[in-house]
Amino acid sequence: MVARFTGAGLGLLAFAITAASGLLVGNPIEVTLSRSILALILFCVLGLLLGGTAHCVIAEHQRQSEASIREQVRAKSAETDRAPEDGGETSEGETIEA
């Protein structure tokens, strides 16, 4: 989704800038439109590549964050499971008597 939006946005921006600059300079309409369409296609492809790259980077960061959170949860649950066995004290410092 991000890749398509980025491609569409960059393509339309390139088309608008190229068309406006061609009309301001006074180029013939055929030249202006052909250059604008070429810019639209090139920048759409560029935007798709950039958007796809951004999507992959964000997905990888999310996977790493989730793995880190899972590891912290496992460590915390392992710590709470073995805490009474290790010293016989609770987290408040009270001694557990059997």
Image: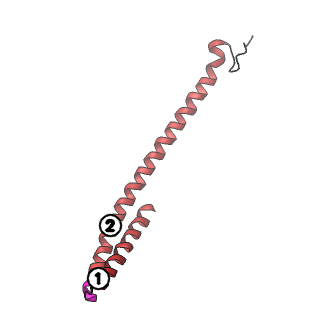
Q: Quadrant of the C terminus?
A: top right
Residue 73 at x, y = what percent? 58, 33
Say if 35 sits above or below 47 in the image: below
Residue 37 at x, y = what percent? 30, 78
| Residue ID for mark 2 | 45
| Residue ID for mark 1 | 22
Q: Which class describes the residues within 10 Å of circle 1: few (<14), some (14-19), or many (20+)?
A: some
Q: Which residues are magenta?
A: 25-34
Q: Looking at the image, do the residues carrying marks 2 and 1 touch, with CB atoms under 8 Å apart?
A: no
Say if 30 sits above or below 63 in the image: below
User: For this view, does 72 lie left or right of residue 1?
Assistant: right
Say if 95 sits above or below 44 in the image: above
Please tell me which residue is depicted at 40% across the width and 52% down the height of the picture: 56
Q: Is residue 6 magenta?
A: no
Counting residues from the start of the chain, the first of labels 2 and 1 encountered is 1
Please tell me which residue is depicted at 32% across the width and 66% down the height of the picture: 45
Residue 34 at x, y = what percent? 27, 82
Instruction: Give me the disc on residue 71.
Output: none
Q: Amino acid at mark 1?
A: Gly
Residue extending furthest front?
Answer: 25
User: For this view, does 5 lie left or right of residue 24?
Assistant: right
User: For this view, does 7 lie left or right of residue 96?
Assistant: left
